[in-house]
Amino acid sequence: MHRVEEGGGVTQLKLDELDQARQYFQAAKSSPRAKISEKAGYTSTLPQMIRDVKTILRTRLDKLMTTFQLSNPTFFAGYQSARVIVDRHGPGGGVEPPAPPTP
């Protein structure tokens, strides 16, 4: 692969190790970009998946749960409560708190 000169202290083994390290670096260097692309692909499918899950909940599970409305009202009330989605607004987009005064 590479020409090794006599007496230079560079052996074929060292060159092979260097080439292996270079290949590892090249793979690691492109890894973050590949992960970003993969994540973007998953994220783009989320809206449809959320709609599908909501449909299943409304058309199947919610109807199944009505059988417990009379036989186990506590369980039914707990289910109804758990079905309420609380939006916590997540990180970002909010108002930044004021900086504390400097002494």
Image (cartoon, grey):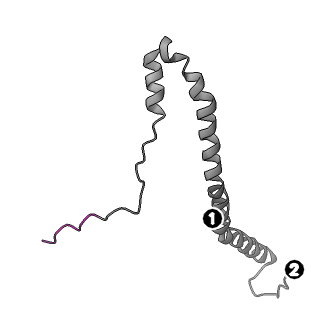
Q: Which residue is mark 1?
A: 36
Quarter holding the N terminus is bottom right
> Circles 2 and 1: CB distance less than 8 Å?
no
| SS under mark 1 | helix
- Amino acid carrying label 2: it is Met
Q: Seen in the image, is 54 located left or right of residue 25?
A: left
Q: Quadrant of residue 32?
A: bottom right
The type of residue carrying mark 1 is: Ile
Residue 29 place in picture, x, y as percent: 66, 72
The image shows residue 19 at horizontal and vertical percentages of 76, 75
Residue labelled with disc 2? 1
Within-10-Å neighbours for mark 1: few <14, some 14–19, many 20+: few
CA separation in Å, label 2 and label 1:
35 Å
The mark nearer the N terminus, 2 or 1, is: 2
Residue at coordinates 23% horizontally, 68% vertically from top-left? 99
Residue 3 located within the stretch drawn in magenta: no
* Rendered position, 34 above or below 78: below
Q: Residue furthest top?
A: 71
- Residue 103: horizontal and vertical position, in percent? 12, 71
Which residues fall within the magenta stretch?
97-103
The image shows residue 87, relative to residue 42, as above or below, that is: above
Where residue 62 appears, as percent x and y from the top left, is 56, 28
